Amino acid sequence: TEIGKILRDEGKNDEAKKSIDKALVLKPDYMDAQIQSTLVLEAEGNFQDAISKLEEIAAQNPSNVEVFFQLGRVYYNNNQTDKAISSLQRAISLSPNHSNSLYALGMAYQKNGQKEEALKMFEKVLKLNPGNQDVMAKITELKKTEESPAKGGK
């Protein structure tokens, strides 16, 4: 699985898939390998299959924060913002201090025009990761747009 992650990051999706499949043959219920197989699909641009597999995994593992984080992230990357928000909220209900889910939820809220909610998420991430430059920039950006006339959030 770890080799598959490296290969996927290098854009070698076919090799990554083979490596992850080997891990799943050895241990079919290995959650990380299951998730990684969906991320290879996403890397190939196959969002629908990635989402379908992640939804299946989530249904079978309703208390796994990583599954809901990844599902939310893939929904977001597939421009399904409302579903992303729902999945990321689920991840945070399972693990309130899961920084990746909080950050991704902030991004989804921002994309959805929900600036106040986005700001709250980024501020939580900053408390958990003091000094994070990216998060500080997001907060500054949102505060600037907050001072501008509202465009009407959801």
Image: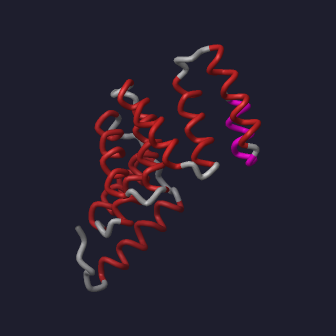
Q: Nearer the viewer, residue 55 or 114?
A: 55
Report if residue 85 lies within the magenta region: no
> Where does residue 151 sit, x and y in percent of width and height?
27, 80
Q: Residue 120: x and y, percent?
A: 30, 58
**Residue 57 in view:** yes
Residue at (76% x, 36% y) in the render: 15
Q: Residue at x 46, y 49 (%)?
A: 73
Query: Is 8 included in the stretch rendered in magenta?
Result: yes
x, y (%) of residue 88? Answer: 36, 46
Q: Which residue in the rendered view is the most extreme toward the bottom? A: 149
**Which region of the structure is painted magenta?**
2-11
Q: Main secondary structure of the magenta part?
A: helix
Give the quadrant of residue 112: bottom left
Left or right: 146 as drawn, with respect to 26: left
58 lies above or below 125: above
> Which residue is painted at 28% across and 60% down in the image?
117
